[in-house]
Image: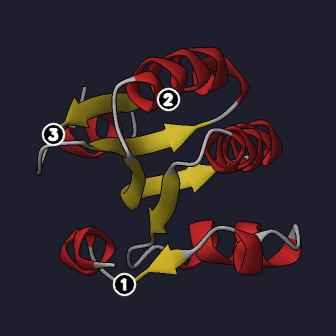
Amino acid sequence: MTGESISLQPTIEVRSPQSHAALVVLRGEHDLYSADQLRQTIDMSLSGCDHLIIDLSSAEFIDSTVIGVLVQSMKKASGVGRKFSVVLGTSPFVERALEVSGVLPLLNVMPTVERALAA
């Protein structure tokens, strides 16, 4: 296995950069096969925080199922009075996928995790 193929493996990591904030970091390529794990991770994180931040800056690819999870999660967060932010990175494909699907304006996109925390 080369280093490049390892980087494309989907990983989901949860951090707590501030009290009452949960940061869910996606790395690699995320699609139907990682969507359920992402949904469960977000649901668990949302139950214990006031501000949920999804960091897509290390994601190389997301598909429509992952976009659906993000939209559902944003709606859940809003429904229970929690803040929800998405951090985009340099992958033009991830931003383009969100843009083409029409959800980019809904997701409270921030340029960095630090800016999301300060919002």
For the residues marked 2 and 1, what is the alpha-carbon distance in whole angstroms?
20 Å
Provide the secondary structure element on which disc 2 rests.
Answer: helix
Residue 75 badge: none
Q: Position of residue 109 (x, y in %)?
A: 53, 76
Q: Nearer the viewer, residue 51 or 58?
A: 51
Q: Residues within 10 Å of mark 3 (few under 14, many from 20)?
A: some
Q: Position of residue 101 (x, y in %)?
A: 87, 67
Residue for point 51% across, 48% down: 82
Q: Residues within 10 Å of mark 2 (few under 14, many from 20)?
A: many
35 in relation to 74, above or below: above
Callout 1 touching callout 3 (CB < 8 Å): no
13 in relation to 100, above or below: above
Query: Residue beneath label 3, please?
Result: 16
Name which of mark 3 and mark 2 comes first in the sequence: 3
Residue for point 45% across, 21% down: 41
Q: Amino acid at mark 1?
A: Pro
Q: Position of residue 87 (x, y in %)?
A: 41, 68
Q: Amino acid at mark 3?
A: Ser
Task: Answer with left or right where residue 114 lies relative to residue 83.
Answer: left
Name which of mark 2 and mark 1 comes first in the sequence: 2
**Quadrant assignment for the C terminus:** bottom left
Q: Nearer the viewer, residue 47 or 114?
A: 47
The image quarter containing residue 48 is top left
Residue for point 35% across, 30% down: 12
Provide the secondary structure element on which disc 1 rests.
Answer: loop
Q: Nearer the viewer, residue 56 or 50?
A: 50
Residue 42 badge: 2
Q: Position of residue 84 (x, y in %)?
A: 52, 57
Query: Residue beneath label 1, please?
Result: 111
Q: Residue furthest front?
A: 81
Provide the secondary structure element on which disc 3 rests.
Answer: loop
Q: Residues within 10 Å of mark 1 (few under 14, many from 20)?
A: few
